[in-house]
Image (cartoon, rainbow, N blue to C red):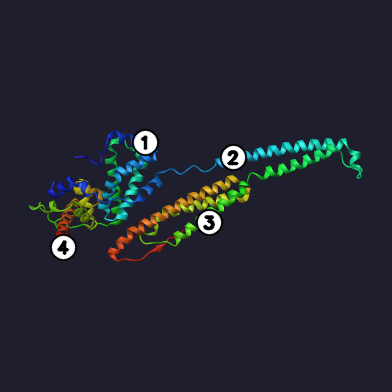
Amino acid sequence: MDKLKQYLREHSSALDNDEPGENAWNNILRQTTPAPAPVRKLYTRWYAIAAAAVLVCLAGWQWIMLNDTAVTAAQPLAWDNKLLAPPQATVVKTVQHVEAVKQEKAVTTVPPDMTAVLGSFSRNYSRLVRLQEKAIRHTPVMAEAPDYFEDFRLMLRQMDNEEILIRKEMKKNGKEEVLLEQLITLYQQKLEVLKALQTEIGKLNGRTKEERQRTGTTGSYYLNI
Amino acid sequence: MYDLLEPAKTIQTAVVLKAVHGDTDAKAWLYRQYSKAMFNICIRMTGSRSCAEDVLQDAFIQAFRQLTQLKDPDSFGGWLRRIVVNECIRHSKRSFYWNEWEPDQMEEIADEAGEWWTSLSMEMIHEQIKKLPEGCRQVFVLYVLEDFTHKDIAADLGISESTSKSQYQRARQLLKDRIGKQVATHG
């Protein structure tokens, strides 16, 4: 072993003067932490509330229908004479009927319309995806041939095809919650891919910038995704 | 001498096993233990801070994803180091095209009698290593600090063994010339 090599190996720990930036660990953590499970428990709770509300309404309606029929059958003559006030029992039943209707309306309006909520989510995600695509289309790429990003392009194209299939399904069967959830999941995955693509472009541009400062070369292109 | 790459074995074994099961704190501990040493390998190999951070991140991500393949938790340091060096070599192949040197262009330099490096600070030597040109810098780092043979370097970088040797000699000469100039200018 030559003496320079021997000397440097003996003192190698003293060569370690640099430290990585704080973002390095955050990036590693983000890429090695599994994605959180999709929020489904909320929908289950709302489904349970909606089901309970429907049962209460049905039971209430049944009870009202039974009592209305009994009252009408028992007091035909009094209702025919408009000068006479209706019997007290009927007034009580009518008030109870009105109360039951009010309750039914109140109960049925408590759970939100999940289809509308999910539809709103999917529209917002769609907007985010379009914004991210636009940002990438306007980012100059300073190095590597466009083929370098072919994998990303293929992935995005596949996701576009999946979106078309889901939307066709929606046209056929209406905006079912299951389909809207699939669409939202697809948009979330697409956003992850677009973010990864933007990170990759950023890394390449950073590397090329230093190289160009030495060689003085120029030129860039834009990705058409 | 206390080897910074091999801390207390029992703690490391426990931490690596926890990291295998996805424990974020365990991964953070491993990162804190090894990131500085690995980062300096990356920065010496790539010559650029931003590239070194990219390669460091890629190496750690790969290591954490393949942690289940590590048979001996105590050898995590050496295993990680191989991943880091391989990532650095992969990066250099992507960004640099080798021009084959004539094998006899650089004659082997005999060990200097004066051993000019002993009077210098390691910080200065480290700075000059980072500034070596592409090609000879990678060979110098792999041969001197990672203890690769010229045969291994040739195989990994896709060059001939004689090119590896001549690049190493070139790096040595450049280091001597540049450090000598710096000392003459700044004292």
Task: Tell me where residue A126 appears, x and y as whole percent.
Answer: 53, 54
Q: Gap in Å between the C-alphas at discs 1 and 3? A: 40 Å
Share a chain, discs 2 and 1? no
Q: Tell me the residue that label 2 is attached to.
A: A45
Q: Are marks 1 and 3 in contact (CB under 8 Å)?
A: no
Q: Residue at horizontal 54%, vertical 51%? A: A163
Chain at numbered mark 2: A
Q: Which three-letter amino acid code belongs to the residue tagged 4?
A: Thr
Q: Gap in Å between the C-alphas at discs 2 and 4? A: 76 Å
**A130 lies left or right of A71:** left
Label 2 Cα neighbours within 10 Å, binned few <14 / some 14-19 / many ≥20: few
Task: Tell me where residue A200 appears, x and y as whole percent.
Answer: 39, 54
Q: Identify the secondary structure beneath mark 4.
A: helix
Q: Tell me the residue that label 4 is attached to.
A: B185
Share a chain, discs 1 and 4? yes
Q: Gap in Å between the C-alphas at discs 4 and 3? A: 59 Å
Q: Tell me the residue that label 1 is attached to.
A: B18
Q: Which three-letter amino acid code belongs to the residue tagged 2?
A: Arg
Q: Quadrant of residue A106?
A: top right
Q: Identify the secondary structure beneath mark 2.
A: helix
Q: Earlier in the sequence, mark 1 or mark 4?
A: 1
Q: Which three-letter amino acid code belongs to the residue tagged 1?
A: Lys
Q: Is residue A224 visible?
A: no
Disc sitting over residue A127 in the figure:
3
Q: Looking at the picture, does residue A204 appear above or below residue A95?
A: below
Q: Residue at horizontal 87%, vertical 38%? A: A87
